Image (cartoon, helix red, strand yellow):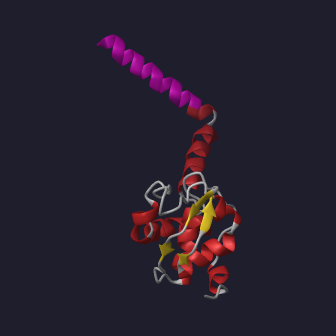
Amino acid sequence: MLFTKINIGVSLLLLGGLYLSNPTSFTNSENEYLSIKEQQPTPLQKSIARGKEVYTDFCIQCHMATGNGNGTTFPPLDGSDWLKNKRTQSIHAAKYGQKGEIIVNGKKFNGIMPPAGLSDEEVADVMNYVMNSWSNKTKKMVTIKEVALLKP
């Protein structure tokens, strides 16, 4: 018991000595932690968070939580070449729905995706979520203005 108390006392003494010899090393670590903790999310991160909610409410039933669709009727969004290479058409489909044949990752899909009645902000948000989820990573943010310019 006495040995343990001595060990604790020596440890505290050493830590105190370290602090007194270089107090900024302790405060800098704390300040760095606080600055990381206090960082605000970027506009894209905020949009992705809102888009996840839209996706959960309107898209997950067909395109699934994994973004893989069902392989027959509903095309995948995860790793979709159509999504990546046809940005405007993808945004248009989210805003106005999609019908007719499309080819996604070399496979034909010919179904109907009815319009969900989303606002331009909701379309931008869900597109930012989809284009930055699973294996998808897009640096260019979909904006409300970009969505608003699309016509039926």
Give the residue furthest to the bottom: 151
Residue 65 position by quadrant: bottom left
The count of marks equals: 0
Residue 26 screen position, x and y as percent: 58, 39
Predominant SS of the magenta segment:
helix
Name the residue nearer the viewer: 34 or 96. Answer: 96
Task: Name the residue rendered at 40%, 70% in the picture.
Answer: 57
Q: Is residue 12 magenta?
A: yes
Q: Quadrant of the N terminus?
A: top left
Task: Name the residue rendered at 63%, 32% in the picture.
Answer: 21
Give the residue furthest to the left: 1
Q: Is residue 22 magenta?
A: no
Q: Does residue 137 appear in the picture of this structure?
A: yes
Q: Quadrant of the C terminus?
A: bottom right
Task: Name the residue rendered at 53%, 70% in the picture.
Answer: 126
Task: Name the residue rendered at 63%, 35% in the picture.
Answer: 22
Residue 80 position by quadrant: bottom right
Residue 111 screen position, x and y as percent: 50, 70
Residue 106 screen position, x and y as percent: 64, 56
Q: Which residues are magenta?
A: 1-18
Name the residue nearer the viewer: 44 or 90. Answer: 90
